[in-house]
Amino acid sequence: MGGRSLSLSLLYLYFRRLQNTETSSGKTMSTESDHDSGSIDRISELHDSLLVHILSFLPIGDAIKTQVLSKRWKYLCSFIPSLVFRSDSVGRDIYKFAEFVSNTLILCNCTRLKKFAVVFRFYFIQQYETEVNLWTRFAAGKGTEILHLDFHRLGEYEFDEFRYELPQHVYSNSSFQELHFSSCSVTPKAGVDWNSLKKLSIGYVELSDEVIQKILVGSPVLEILELYYFLGVSRLHFSNASLKKLILRENWDGKSNFDELQLEIFAPNLQSLEMLGCLGRKDCRLVDVSSLVDATLNFDLCHEEEDVLEDYGRDVNILRRLLERLAHVKSIKLVDFIFDRLVEPSHASTGDLVAQLHAK
């Protein structure tokens, strides 16, 4: 029986027992004596480790509620190896959410965590920064493999000056294998020590070439890098032989001049490239992508309505340079925007290039 089937079985048992508990006038539930004489409680026959695995499929709030089922269930949820906290699971009260997270961590008996995630959809209030720092220190101390911190407010797409600043202890942890940061300030003051990191995703953030370089030097086995809703980066020079995939989606360019909007990509070992969403007026120049096997260009160069005609020629030049550098790629996916821009009678040579690439 797969994990998903077991999870569904537990859900059925959980709601059935919870309903019985609520109608039993305070009677304590046992494993088999409260069932009909002919029924068999197969879930309770399972080993504790398997029950904990099943509980890991439930939202953390529901998993904790299973403590009322019986004495045996009281402490099982404290051994769940993946802790995922979402603000919508406890309403929109920021104080209650923070209290819920802190209280749950106090009960945790795991020696190591597979995943620790906080999705915080409120306006981030600076007074909670110290508390969040304690959560990240807890995760680091538990040897967490996947750390996910998302503090982006729903519906907000403007750059917000205040970001949760990652504490310095986060940058020195060799247990992290995946890191996901959204609306976090990424500013390592010393070096970065992410020796086991294979995937890094950073969004809604202002970065710098210096910070990117620190991350790359300190992540020797990094395989996948994703940047989204980002600004401040002009160079992505990857000497890491391990880095195989780069994802760029969405971009903040603000009021920058054209010269400040160039993004130079030097990645001779890169095998996969995805450019998605609105890249604004970012001029991405592929200096060396000689090992690239597949590329997805599913983006547009968004402009204000009054700038469309003025920037048309510039768009054509940007896209032509990209396509010329991708001529060797075996598999390439192009979005309609590129055809609309380049397949024009006045750009016959570029149109031929697009057609050749599309034929792949």
Image (cartoon, helix red, strand yellow):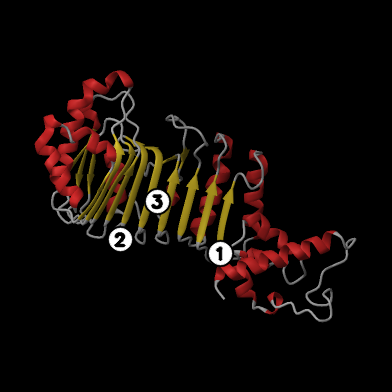
Front one among 248 and 139: 248
Judge depth for marks 2 and 3 and give the one in front.
2
Q: Is residue 301 left or right of residue 182?
A: left
Crowding near the residue tagged with mark 3, few <14, some 14–19, many ≥20 C-alpha atoms within 10 Å: many
Distance between the Cα atoms at labels 2 and 3? Answer: 15 Å
Please tell me how many numbered marks the rendered image carries.
3
Quarter of the picture containing the N terminus is bottom right
Picture coordinates of residue 136 (x, y %)?
A: 51, 51
Front one among 356 and 123: 356
The quadrant in which residue 187 appears is top left
Residue 288 in sight in this render:
no
| Residue located beneath label 3 in the image | 171
Crowding near the residue tagged with mark 1, few <14, some 14–19, many ≥20 C-alpha atoms within 10 Å: many
| Residue located beneath label 2 in the image | 221
Front one among 267 and 278: 278
* Mark number, residue 81: 1
Distance between the Cα atoms at labels 2 and 1? Answer: 24 Å
Residue at position x 48%, y 60% in the image: 144
Q: Along the polypeptide, which appears first: circle 1 or circle 3?
A: 1
Residue kind at label 2, given as amino acid type: Val
Judge depth for marks 1 and 3 and give the one in front.
1
Residue farthest top in this picture? 306
In the image, residue 188 above or below residue 221: above
Picture coordinates of residue 13 (x, y %)?
A: 72, 67
In the image, residue 31 above or below residue 223: below
> Label 2's element?
loop
> Label 1's element?
loop
In the image, residue 102 above or below residue 174: above
Q: Is residue 237 left or right of residue 164?
A: left
Residue kind at label 1, given as amino acid type: Pro
Residue at position x 39%, y 45% in the image: 202
